[in-house]
Image (cartoon, coloured by chain):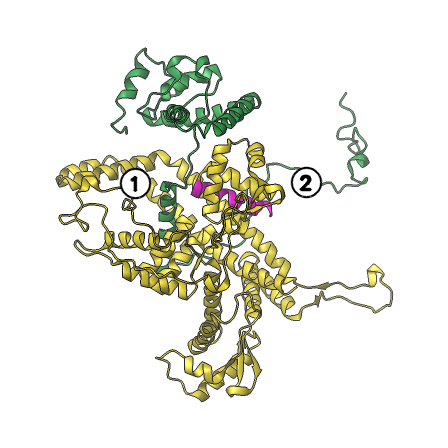
Amino acid sequence: MAGNKGRGRAAYTFNIEAVGFSRGEKLPDAVLKPPPLFPDADYKPVPLRTGEGEDYMLALKQELRETMKRMPYFMETPEEKQDWRRLPREMMPTKKCKKAGPKSKKAKDAGKGTSLTNTADVLKKIEELEKRGDGEKSDEENEEKEGSKEKGKEGEEEEEDDAAEQEEYDEEEQEEENDYINSYFEDGDDFGADSDDNMDEATY
Amino acid sequence: MTQAEIKLCSLLLQEHFGEIVEKIGVHLIRTGSQPLRVIAHDTGTSLDQVKKALCVLIQHNLVIYQVHKRGVVEYEAQCSRVLRMLRYPRYIYTAKTLYSDTGELIVEELLLNGKMTMSAVVKKVADRLTETMEDGKTMDYAEVSNTFVRLADTHFVQRCPLVPATENSDSGPPPPAPTLVISEKDMYLVPKLSLIGKGKRRRSSEEDATGEPKAKRPKHTADNKEPIPDDGIYWQADLDRFHQHFRDQAIVSAVANRMDQTSSEIVRTMLRMSEITTSSSAPFTQPLSSNEIFRSLPVGYNISKQVLDQYLTLLADDPLEFVGKSGDSGGGMYVINLHKALGSLATATLESVVQERFGSRCARIFRLVLQKKHLEQKQEIPKTPDHAPSRTFYLYTVNILSAARMLLHRCYKSIANLIERRQFETKENKRLLEKSQRVEAIIASMQATGAEEAQLQEIEEMITAPERQQLETLKRNVNKLDASEIQVDETIFLLESYIESTMKRQ
């Protein structure tokens, strides 16, 4: 039943004291909207200093950033090792180009980690060469294998995260080629094979 | 290390060295000293990659190693040194103002590479300078060497600790890691090298500097099998010396603002005289006599001895106490109170922040409390001997050290926010940026092969007007964010200097 709404005082259905308010009227205001993202700034900030020195340092900073990315000290993240026996052969990236987009996109459904670029292939080659080369490095390699095996066991979550990362990256790469939403696009039989070979030209 | 510092280190490492180095570096900052295998295990990274990452970090003086008992080598990260990467543009620009382009490039190469031999630096810088010179002109190694020596003499570059020379190698197996040593007197000692040569251009012009055909030109100039004359002697930028310079700059500029140009020149002279005699962490400089100061004033300055004495007295009497009088011999002995000066600069920074954030009234209150040390709110205060709350009165005070620490922490957070925002802006516009770069590359190559104006225009039009607008906005925003990073770092420098100086006193 509606009860005594409007007649007399409102009665709470629970013990108001349990929540921490004493019997009284002073309840906090109702929250009508989420709190603001940033606190209000009462005063505008002072403008940045300008001048020859500042301009020069700015240019220096931006140049340094670019330069450091090209130095040998910058370590690129290598590809996650895949077990190629379990994936369709067409998943393996070809040597030439980075944009193996359409192939890896299909793997989204498989839910398995996708490989993006030819770097995995290159790494494999390097590994093979290393095996043939120095016998000294065998210890390191065993440890690497152990490392990756352990990773394989533990790394279910990691792989999925990685797959998610790679998928994201894939989508971005895809965007460069066309404006279509990925799920609407159906690959033709020869799509993958052809596009990879002609990637010397830039796309706009 | 606070979370804010760790976050900032993470962003800096990632931007400069990539994700793997960032992972290893941040792990070490969080956990402290660890051996190689534990790092690999805890971070889930392959041993090979951990080794490479550690090599990069050690090369850049961001990680040090130590041999512990039972021959285990442990690696330790230097969080504060990582934060110094923010200041690289300032170090390089300072070198430019003091030693012009040659000095600038020397310091830049040392910072980019962490450590280098003198011969390697000289060659690289000569090559770089030659690139910028007119056709046919080259930069002589000797000139670069001279600038290098000057940088070493004024302590802006220093030797890295060396591998100790082992006399007899059969006194047991070699240690797992060398213990690098350097003595005070060797730190700025330049090896006697006769570096003869000139810089080489990368592109071959009609007359190649070395006469080698282009096809044979190696990527790196180290194809000659001559032994490197200064092998094993590495140099790095001496960041503490730069900091001393920044501190001096800040003091001089504060005196100029508060008093006048002449006073600031006198203070600058005193600081210059104390550069090498006073350690950078001393609370005040060595006493200097008025006579000495008079003799050391810059050549252009024509003030009489009496005027100098008047200025010195004024400076010593000023309530800010930048200059103090420590005796009467030699016409009066004066010192610069470095610690007090840093305190004043930190306090001024705090006042300024209060003013800009909370308004003039709050700034007045803040300054009053600072001045009076302890202030009470206006209230009726009956005096009673007991401590009953209703009859106790509370005083307000500013704890400068705490406030400085708090503000410093905020600065770290600010810069982290600035960097993240900049990365976000860049990422949002990644596609457009890449398109714009491609178009520029095409235009450049077309210009090189002599294309017509009409063709160039056609290519330029591939970027539409709204896209140009977007790029302009992006550039403006990124510039603003970058400039903000640089200026917040200046505040970080002042606050850190003050805190460091205060902690040494406790």
Q: Residues within 10 Å of mark 2 (few under 14, many from 20)?
A: few
- Crowd around label 1: few <14 · some 14–19 · many ≥20 (10 Å): some
Helix, strand or loop under label 1? helix
Residue A111 image point, x, y percent = 49, 17
Distance of mark 1 from mark 2, alpha carbons?
A: 48 Å
Location of residue B216 with respect to A98 vertically, above or below = below
Residue B183 on the magenta span: no
Q: Is B12 colored magenta in this rendering?
A: yes
- The residue beneath circle 2 is A29
Pointer 2 indicates a residue of which chain? A
Report how many numbered discs are placed on residues in the image: 2
> Is the residue A183 above or below the residue B14 in the image?
above
Q: Is residue B117 left or right of residue B445?
A: right
Q: Colour of chain B?
A: yellow
Any part of residue A58 in sight: no
Name the side, left or right, on which B53 lies relative to B96: right
At 53% across and 58% down in the image, what residue appears?
B356
Labelled pair 1, 2 in contact (Cβ < 8 Å) = no
- The disc label shown at residue B468, or none: 1
Which residues are drawn in magenta? B1-17
Q: Residue at x 55, y 59 (%)?
A: B495
The answer to whether one can see residue B237 in this image is: yes
Left or right, A24 with respect to B7, comes to right
Q: Position of residue B293 (x, y in %)?
A: 45, 81
Q: Is residue B484 above or below residue A108?
A: below
Q: Nearer the viewer, residue B336 or A150?
A: A150
Instruction: State the predominant SS element of the stretch in magenta.
Output: helix
What color is chain A drawn in? green
Query: Is B277 placed left or right of A178 in the picture?
Result: right
Callout 1, which amino acid?
Arg
Residue B350: which quarter of the image?
bottom right
Badge 2 amino acid: Asp
